[in-house]
Amino acid sequence: MGLKKVVLDVLKPIKEPSLVTLARNLARVTGVKEVSIVVSEMDVETVSLVVSIIGKDINFEEVEDTLRELGTALHSIDEVTFESEAEGGGEEG
């Protein structure tokens, strides 16, 4: 099944991209079904965001590329939910 949820700490410039633009572009990433963005801190030049991405087999490399292309910086990965394809949740040989 792959990556189901990831919560990111992201820093963006105060003006662009807008939160709507950022959410719209992240929602286009392969496997993404839902994007939620919460402003956690603001200063004169930047905005700190908590970005939650939910889906099925999310392409995390595409997420990173999208953030980079929009001029944002990924500070940290704060939460991850990953679902195994193997029954019983164990690793397959």
Image (cartoon, rainbow, N blue to C red):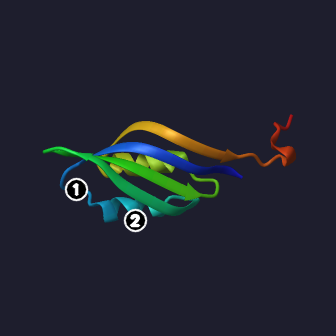
Identify which residue is drawn at 19% across, 51% down: 14
Helix, strand or loop under label 1: loop
Identify which residue is drawn at 57% across, 43% down: 80
Which residue has dot 1 on it? 16
Left or right of residue 3, residue 23 in this image: left
Is disc 1 surrounded by few (<14), some (14 to 19) or many (20+) residues within 10 Å?
few
When asked about the image quadrant of residue 16, the answer is bottom left
* Nearest to the observer: residue 29 or residue 48: 48
Can residue 47 be seen? no
Left or right of residue 78, residue 85 in this image: right
Q: How far apart are marks 1 and 2 (CA)?
A: 13 Å
Give the image location of residue 87, x and y in percent: 86, 48
* Mark closest to the chain's N terminus, 1 or 2: 1
Q: Which amino acid does label 2 sit on?
A: Arg
Can residue 68 be seen? yes
Q: Which amino acid does label 1 sit on?
A: Glu
Helix, strand or loop under label 2: helix
Give the image location of residue 48, x and y in percent: 30, 45
Identify which residue is drawn at 72% across, 52% down: 1
Which residue has dot 2 on it? 24
Left or right of residue 61, residue 70 in this image: left
